[in-house]
Image (spheres, rainbow, N blue to C red):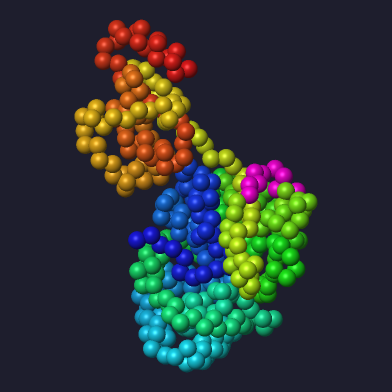
Amino acid sequence: MLAHPFIKWVGGKSQLLDEIRTRYPNRIEKYCEPFVGGGAVLFDVLQKSMPEEVLINDINKELINTYEQIRDNCDDMIIQLSELQSRYKNQTLEENKNLFYKKRNRYNEIKMNENKDEKLEKAALFIFLNKTCFNGLYRVNSKGQFNVPFNNAKNPLLCDESNLKECSRLLQNVEMRTGDYKDCKDFIDERTFVYIDPPYRPLTQTSSFTSYSENGFTDKEQIELGNFIKEISNKGAMVLASNSDPKNVDAQDNFFNEIYKDFMVETVYAKRAINSNGRKRGNVSELLISSFKQDAYIPVESFQRESFSKYGIFLPKFEISKIKIDKSRFSFCNEISQNEVKNIAYNFHKNAWEPITLDEDFYLKDGQHRLEAAKLMGLKYIDAFIFIDKPAKTETKSRRRREVF
């Protein structure tokens, strides 16, 4: 199964995954998410790109504790959540309301005591409260106590056992930190893809709510974040960031355009349901800010070019749209293995990237998995090779060169 976020999180990116995914770099060897939140992008990257090194961070230490407990103590977590699920299912709504406030008090008690022996219980209660509180909010008062009210849910899924196990499997080699996003700087280098999803700049004064942690995120912090993104981009990191679009309420508001004037700023749309008034929930524009462009073409290693060129025509940067496929022409099994496609796509930098082979009419002869991997990565061009049986075919060779270039 595909893992998905184990909690609901304000500003979660599940709705925007299709948009965000198209902006991933072609290969992700190293990944960092300084504001991990619900982890929609994290789990997508872990499953689709299989990076070798991963760091996640969040200033909300209770959230990071929950990630850690799912990684390290998933079976025990499932036991606690299953007990809560069974109890909730067999009670009246009024009894469940009383249960919610009892567990909320218990959670705040553990949170304030910071007893290391109670971290697992705290994480289980974190998920329970998230599933049964209003809109899945995480909000604290001035004392740092969780204070979101009951949501009157009749049958919430408190223990999604199969998803928790898959999340745990994916998180095994993930480094986790609690603290300021700037503390991730030592991990980030020129090989790192960094996705940054900070607390959004509120569109209006009333659209904000008490912070999801004990710390606020004002325009001053947004500007500081912009400087941080510039700094890590100058190190060579590939950065993709999200934020609200001020032009939803003021077409002349260029706050983010000014901060990110040296980056690509694109508008995308998401349905947001944070407003308590259902009539005011709907599609709003958001911003995706990128420091890099995805490659449309990635060449094979130079030694492979030289090797293949001895036996025919090497076609660098050949348009994928020009490649014809007729499976009846194949001399091999033409069933495609999606696992093999993914393996090539995400490991080609380890000398697994070879040119595909075409005939003189540009029909695919060999390399269907490589071709599908190129498509999966969003490439528009691929290195190809036309094998020449007899060196005497110089006329054909010259003609093909003229057609391609």
Judging depth in this view, the residue of 299 and 116 nearest the camera is: 299
Question: Residue at 53% of width from left, 72% of height from top?
Answer: 63
For the N terminus, give its image quadrant: bottom left
Q: Is residue 35 visible?
A: no
Count of marks, rendered view: 0
Highlighted magenta segment, given as a residue range: 258-267
Judging depth in this view, the residue of 262 and 120 nearest the camera is: 262
Residue 370 on image: x %, y %: 35, 36
Compared across the picture, whether 37 is left or right of 220 comes to left
Q: Is residue 404 above or below residue 120?
A: above
Compared across the picture, whether 137 is left or right of 53 comes to right
Name the residue at the front extreme. 279
Q: Is residue 291 visible?
A: yes
Q: Is residue 129 magenta?
A: no
Question: Residue at 42% of width from left, 42% of height from top?
Answer: 376
Compared across the picture, whether 268 is left or right of 227 comes to left
Residue 104 on image: x %, y %: 54, 86
